[in-house]
Structures are given as C-alpha cells and as structure tokens.
Image: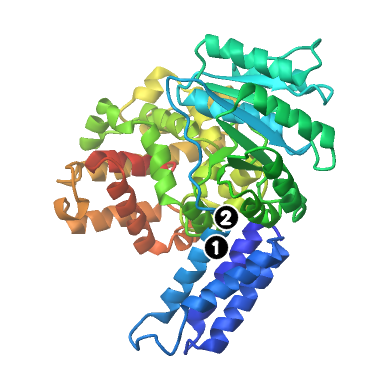
Amino acid sequence: MVLADLGRKITTALHSLSKATIINEEVLNGMLKEICAALLEADVNIRLVKKLRENVRSVIDFEEMAGGLNKRRMIQSAVFKELVKLVDPGVKPYTPIKGKPNVIMFVGLQGSGKTTTCTKLAYHYQKKNWKSCLVCADTFRAGAYDQVKQNCTKARIPFYGSYTEVDPVVIAQDGVDMFKKEGFEIIIVDTSGRHKQEESLFEEMLAVANAVKPDNIIFVMDATIGQACEAQAKAFKEKVDVGSVIITKLDGHAKGGGALSAVAATQSPIIFIGTGEHIDDLEPFKTKPFISKLLGMGDIEGLIDKVNELKLEDNEELLEKIKHGQFTLRDMYEQFQNIMKMGPFSQIMGMIPGFSQSFMSKGSEQESMARLKRLMTIMDISLSYSIMDSMNDGELDSRDGAKLFSKQQGRITRVAQGSGVTEREVKDLITQYTNFAAVVKKMGGIKGLFKGGDMAKNVNQAQMAKLNQQMAKMMDPRVLHQMGGIPGLQNMMRQLQAGAAGGMGGLGNLMNSFGK
C-alpha cells in the first residue's frame, strides 16, 4: 500500500468515529483494528504498530471520561500524536552554522539515490545563499564521479574528485581540506553505497568518517525496500554515528512505511524527503505537517514559510497598485514567476488542506500538473508563464489587457504561435486574468484591508464576504468542496493572514498561494 492510500485508510477509520452514535470500546477497537491493518499493509514494523495501539488504548478510559468530554476529538488526537511519535525519535537534528565549514557525510545502500540526493542538498543550501560544494569519495561504483560531475556542472555546484586516485579516504580528506581553505560552508562528502554484509566497505566508511570528522552523517534510506530498511539502518548506526536521515523515492509509488518506521532503529531524525528526480524535489521534513498532509489536513505553516521566502512585502509597487484596484498582465506574469520559485507545484498544492492526499498519491510532477488541470479551471502555472512570456511590453503593461486582446484577435494568434499553444489556451489565460483583475479591483475598494493586525477587526465583513464569494466562483466546485466550501476558504485566508507578516503581507501571500 502506497503512502497516500495509507493516509486515506487512516482518515476513513478516524471518520468512522463521526458516524458512530455512541463512542464505546467496540467502536474504538474497530477503528484501531482498521488503522493497524493499514499500517502493517504499508510495511510499518509490527512492533511499532502494536505499540501505537497500546499507547492509544492507554490514554482512553471511557469510565473516567467526563460526560461532556468530546470523546471523538480525544481519540483522534491520541491517534495523531502516536502517528507523530512513529516517525519522530525526539532528537534534534544537526543545524549547520553560517560562516564556518560544516562537513556533511552521506552513507547508504547502493541504489538508494544517495549521489543524486547529495546534489539536491547542496543545491538546497546554495539557493539559501550558503557556499556549498560536493566531494565524490565513491571509488567503488563505476561512473560515480562522472555522475557527480554532470549533476554539479548542471546545478553550478563546485565539486572535487579523481579519476586516478583509488583510495576514498585520500580523496575525501583532500577535497574537504581544499574546500575548507576556500571558505565553503556546506561541504558534502559522497561515499560508496554499501550493504551490511560487505564488511570491507563498512570499514572503509568508518575510515572516511575518521579522516574528515563530519559534523553530521546522513543515512540515505530508500522508501521502496520495505521492512528490510530496519536491519540496514541498524547496521549503519552501529558502525558510524548516523546523525540524521533522508528518505528518498517517497513520491507516492513507494510503500514508505518501512522506511518511516526504520527511523526508530537509527534514533535519528528525518531531515528531508526526496519526492522525485528533479533537483528541487527535496522537501524539508517536519513531522507534524507531514502527518497532517498524509491525513489530508494540509500544511498551512509550510505554505506560509514558502511564501515568506519570496519576501513579497518588499514589492511596494505591486502593493500600491493592488490598494488602488489595479492589476496588469505583467503583475500576473511576475507573480507566476514567484510561484515557480517556490518549488514543484504539486508540492505547494499538497500543503493546501484537501489537496494533500491526491498530490502525494501519484508520482511525477507532470502527472500532478495534468490532474490539477483537469480538476481546476485555472491553467497550469508553467503553461501560463510560457504564454505570457510571448506577450510584448504593451500587452503586459496595459491597464486593461483583456480588452486589448478582445479588440485585436491577431494578438491572440501571435501569442499562441510564439508560445506553441492553441488560441483556446491563450483565451483561457485572458479569462483567468480578467477574473483575478476583478478580485483585485474589489480588494482595492475594501477599506481597512491593508492595515496591519487582525483583518477581522479592520475590514467590513459584508464586503469581505462578497470578496470570498467572488473568489469561490472562480474555483471549480470540486476544488471548493475539497477545501471545505466557503468556510474552508475563509479559514485558510485567516490562517495565511495571521501567519504572514501582517496585513498586506498576508494578502499578498494569499494571492500567490492560490496560484492565480
């Protein structure tokens, strides 16, 4: 059973409490039986499943529960907490220190995606303005250095390796020493993939660790190998001091339960998960948001973090225009650029309550985009960006771009040919722009919308309700239903507004989080 199916089954079991007229031992046991069966089917270790069941049962005492206590909520909360404990060893991960060399050594099985993950992590830190690099100390696998060279050249990450030196300890030490002298902050050392039966390779791994004295040893765990993860994780932990874990191939096709529960064997925190083959398919791992997404509850906190990274509140010109109800095609074009900077679009949509399970369930970004396009009336982001890239300055900066295109059909033909799409798709984009321009115009007319503090106190609630209804009309009814209708939409707006840097920052973030 893949992770998304696991999430759905657990959610269904939890919802069974809502259908029960009386919450008693029989109902609780039935729900726990369903959850435990789902966990076992997803390859979660049987000892951990048994422990989860016992822990939930231990906190639920029907005889001592007060009559007015919400039993359903208490049971659901207990299950959520135990699911969190399943993948959280309670150990804080190593935090790199800015301005000093942080040596990070990668270990793992052959074929676990270790080398690719090394590049992803270096790229992750590089995007955050850390001076990062990669040392290839894998002399066992033919082509390992070529792979590092290709990956790093493409991502513009400095790297070190050798075609002639056969001793990985020498390569690792020379590379780390060189990059330390050059002032690099994140020095990642890739080592040979190994198996617990290969004693000589394990000794080599220990020798490399002793030579470079890493600040953090990351164990890369393949989500597709099931319960075999645990024995391998223990073997690595016994040999070197594994400080943290990255789980790869957790893109919906993997069962994943074995890998997640094997974390208990390392007693080391998961710090990232790999969700695809692209260089930005690496998500920072936070336990509670991960379980929330698994159960279809979204990750508003993660969405706010992603949006705040863009520093949208610095864009004073756009904010002034929105205050006055103005929104051009160029504004939309620039906001699409911002959305694309946030990472893979399916990853962003997975943070929105209601979308989490469907976006975790299927493998590739392309599949996610295709499903989103069928599900929603909005165009997919990359296609819209491509269309607007073929527009000229006059079209992008016009106060009424929609009217310009409707009066001169030749513009639609030219843009369609320039971007390699159909005229229908260009027209769809113009329609979407018209809808959002109308929302911006309405926002500009609501007094108090751009003040700091609590939006509920500053804003005319009747006008706000009309704005919410207009936004709801722009969405496919199925999408709105997934989000919990207009109340769900309003709740998400409140969370975004409260979580962002107040007032207009929150509204700017909201506009972007909806993907236009």
Q: Nearer the viewer, residue 95 or 396?
A: 95
Where is residue 11? Give x, y as percent.
55, 68
Dividing the picture into quadrants, the one containing residue 153 is top right
The amino acid at mark 1 is Leu
State left or right for residue 442 relative to residue 132: left
Badge 2 is on which residue?
87
- Residue placed at 31% from the left, 47% from the top? 499
Q: Nearer the viewer, residue 406 or 226?
A: 226
Where is residue 459? Give x, y as percent.
17, 52
State which quarter of the image contains the C terminus: top left
* Vertical comparison of 63 with 72: above or below: below
Q: Secondary structure at mark 2?
A: helix
State which quarter of the image contains the N terminus: bottom right
Identify the mark at residue 111; answer none if there is no mark.
Answer: none
Figure disc tally: 2
Q: Secondary structure at mark 1?
A: helix
Tell me if residue 193 can be seen.
no
Where is residue 254? Give x, y as percent.
71, 51
- Residue placed at 27% from the left, 33% from the top? 326
Q: Tell me whether circle 2 and circle 1 mark residues in contact (CB < 8 Å).
A: yes
Q: How is the image coloured?
A: rainbow
| Disc 2 from disc 1: Cα separation | 7 Å
* Vertical comparison of 52 with 90: above or below: below
* Vertical comparison of 161 with 119: above or below: above
The amino acid at mark 2 is Val
Using a 10 Å C-alpha cutoff, classify the residue at mark 2 as few (fewer than 14 neighbours), some (14 to 19) or many (20 or more).
Answer: many
Identify the mark at residue 83; answer none if there is no mark.
Answer: 1
Q: Nearer the viewer, residue 284 or 203?
A: 203
Q: Nearer the viewer, residue 70 or 266?
A: 266
State left or right for residue 375 relative to residue 21: right
